[in-house]
Amino acid sequence: MKRKFLRSATAALALAALGAMAATSSAQAQVQERTFKLGLQNPKGHPLEQGAAKFAEIVAAKSGGKIKVNVFPGGTLGGDQQTVSALQGGTVEITVLNSGILASQVKDFEVFDFPFMFATAKEADTVVDGPFGQKLHAKLGDKGIVGLAYWELGFRNLTNGRRPINTVEDIAGLKLRVIPNAINVDWVKALGANPTPMAFPEVYAGLESKAIDGQENPLSVILANKFAEVQKHLAVTNHQYNPQSFIFSKKVWEGLSADEKKIVGDAAAEAGRFQRQVNRAAAASQLEQLKKAGMQVTELNAAEQAKLRAKLAPVIDKHGAAISATVAELQAELAKLRK
């Protein structure tokens, strides 16, 4: 009886193994040899580039090596708008960029560029990973774009080559590079500064030649792009939080099998969690590294922060009027989180 039981158990295990092999074989049969291009603006070593490299690694593992992702950092495929156009045309498959830049495609994305919208990165995670963020990504479908996940760039700060920023008034008169969209132009104007829309790959040269006085970006971007070489002053303002949209060409996406879509989608989410961890773990040391690189660091006190918020409030009101339903939905989500 015991031998019969063992033979039955062995046979059952063998059948289960054969079934698993058959399922794996079937799944692999739905995955073709493919090569995707992933373009992004920040250089090798930046947390976004590290996330992109992790994405490529995960995709290769999940596809049994059939799907290869070539990462092109440092804006080598062009600026964000160029890359989005190439993605819509199907000549670039993937990019990851500031979600607010997608306002040129769907105006509701402008909400992600509102100053002081998110209080913490954790708060932002909950909103963008939940129904609100998914709903916005779904709106990209009509524009030839598939939104797969949200990564992060972080909280933005201000640098310039002319003077330290101790008060809000110190910002007035500076010629500042901004992300090319309306709300960023308007909030810089509201502070009495002169906005200069500029593609990111041009920023270092613009600072070096003094065509612009300064720019604003998270510490990770300032450090990775060596802006300390061409900027002396850093003001820690944390005036804006940037989620990053990880997006895929709809033209290419529609030609993928269900298994391939799952591999890519799961990898985007998994690599995004890794990317956020890397970005946040590095934040503690970035300010000290920038100081060592020669940057003079100032922070606005509570009174000046309040003054900054007050000056930017009319800009939020102006741009919020055109997307009032989206703004109300986001504010309702934030209110629930802050109870």
Image (tube, rainbow, N blue to C red):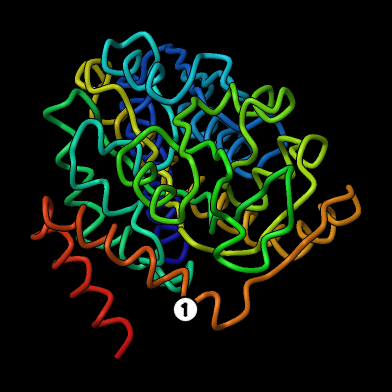
Residue type highlighted by circle 1: Ala
Judging from the image, what secondary structure is the residue with disc 1 in?
A: helix
Q: Nearer the viewer, residue 268 or 284?
A: 284
Who's the residue at 14% across and 40% down the image?
Answer: 139
Q: Quadrant of the N terminus?
A: bottom left
Who's the residue at 11% across and 50% down the image?
Answer: 322
Rendered image quadrant of residue 283: bottom right
Q: Nearer the viewer, residue 183 or 28?
A: 183
Relative to 101, is 122 on the left or the right?
Answer: right
**Residue 278's x, y, as percent?**
65, 54
**Residue 200's x, y, as percent?**
54, 28
Relative to 254, is 16 on the left or the right?
Answer: right
Q: Nearer the viewer, residue 65 or 80?
A: 80
**Residue 55's x, y, as percent?**
52, 36
Q: Nearer the viewer, residue 120 or 172?
A: 172
Relative to 32, is 224 on the left or the right?
Answer: right
Q: Which residue is mark 1?
A: 306
Rendered image quadrant of residue 237: bottom right
Q: Is residue 304 above or below residue 49?
A: below
Relative to 138, is 240 on the left or the right?
Answer: right
Dot 1 alpha-carbon crowd within 10 angstroms: few under 14, some 14 to 19, many 20 or more: few
Who's the residue at 60% across and 51% down the image?
Answer: 218
